[in-house]
Image: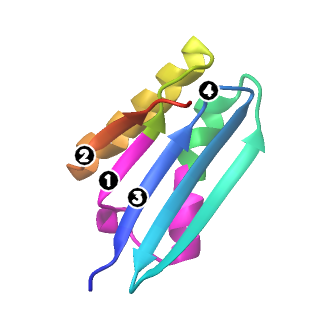
Amino acid sequence: MSSLYLLALDASSSACSAALLRQAGGQRECLARYEMTPRAHTKRLMPMVDEPLADAGIAPQALNAIAFGRGPGSFTGLRIAAGAAQRVGIRLRLPVAGCLYP
């Protein structure tokens, strides 16, 4: 069975996060970065994308899809996460999905 890698981004609040869900052989693992970064999301989100990938030892090309938090939350933060997800998705030709929080 092949591995599944899903990258998830969020910047809807004062916190900023990037997580990698890795599923292989019936096992699931989540590698994540989370920081309180008021007004610094644009500087921290893209570097945070690289960190879980490096921890997992995979290249960005191994990703299968990208998800981002699309609300509710700060309008600017939502735009930052959506833009970052689109940037990575377009570059790697991956599907991108917005996830609405309950």
Please tell me how crowded label 4 is: few (under 14), some (14-19), or many (20+) other residues with Cα within 10 Å: many
| Residue segment shown in magenta | 49-67
**Marks 1 and 3 in Cβ contact (< 8 Å):** yes
| Residue ID for mark 1 | 65
Q: Secondary structure at mark 3?
A: strand
**Residue at x-position 71% and y-position 48%:** 34
57 lies left or right of 67: right
Q: Earlier in the sequence, mark 2 or mark 3?
A: 3
User: Which residue occupies 57% across, 37% down?
Assistant: 10
* CA distance for labels 2 and 1: 5 Å
Identified by mark 3, the residue type is Leu
* x then y, percent, for residue 5: 38, 65
Q: Which residue is mark 3?
A: 6
Residue in the image at 77% along x and 26% along y: 38
Nearest the camera: 24 or 53?
A: 24
Q: CA distance from mark 4 to mark 1?
A: 20 Å
Q: Which residue is mark 4?
A: 12
The answer to whether 28 is drawn above or below residue 70 in the figure is: below
Q: CA distance from mark 2 to mark 4?
A: 21 Å
Classify residue 67 by image quadrant.
top left
Report the quarter where the C terminus lies.
Answer: top right
Tag 2 secondary structure: loop
Whichever of callouts 2 and 4 sits on the residue coming sooner in the sequence is: 4
Q: Which mark is residue 74?
A: none
Q: Would you say the residues marked 2 and 1 are in contact, meaning their CB atoms lie under 8 Å apart? A: yes
Q: Earlier in the sequence, mark 3 or mark 4?
A: 3
**Amino acid on which the number 1 mark rests in the picture:** Ala
Taking the magenta stretch, the answer to whether it contains residue 65 is yes
